[in-house]
Image (cartoon, helix red, strand yellow):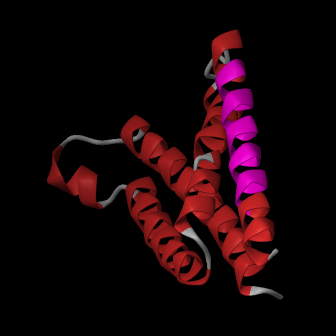
Amino acid sequence: MKAKTLAILLILFTTIFTSSAQLSLKLAVNNLKPGFLGLISNYYLAQGFFLYAIAGALAIAAFRRGDVSVLYPIFATSYVWVSIASAYFFGEYLSTLKLLGIIVIITGIMLVGFGGAKVKNEAMA
């Protein structure tokens, strides 16, 4: 597997872990008990931090293998995953504007990806 393909796969896994971490932090807040003991005994809070740590390690590995200008826009898919998962798990409303925003994010990622491929092909010619 090429390093650039591996970098893209790693950053996609990063987005899944960061999105899961954000959902865990939302659950942590929803289940927060008062006081310091309530904070340190909150399973979802620990889970969120752990998932962020995994995502950080994956992001570092991805950025070592790929171009930031290609990978970072893919990282924006986290917004898409969180929006969809929030609607599913928390019953949050996905308005028409939110859905339009998701479409714009996905379109932007595709344009950046195709633009990066075109520049590389022109540079090789």
Residue at (55, 82) in percent of width and height: 61
Image quadrant in which you'd find residue 70: bottom right
Residue at (71, 20) in percent of width and height: 100
Main SS class of the magenta portion in the image: helix
The one nearer the camera, 37 or 63, is 63
Q: Is residue 124 left or right of residue 98?
A: right
Answer yes or no: is residue 113 visible.
yes
Q: Is residue 90 left or right of residue 6?
A: left
Answer yes or no: is residue 17 visible.
no
Image quadrant in which you'd find residue 16: bottom right
Image quadrant in which you'd find residue 106: top right
The one nearer the camera, 54 or 99, is 99
Write the start and end of the magenta stretch as one range. Answer: 100-116
Q: Position of residue 5 (x, y in %)?
A: 77, 76
The one nearer the camera, 45 or 66, is 66
Residue at (16, 46) in percent of width and height: 35
Report if residue 106 lies within the magenta region: yes
Q: Quadrant of the C terminus?
A: bottom right
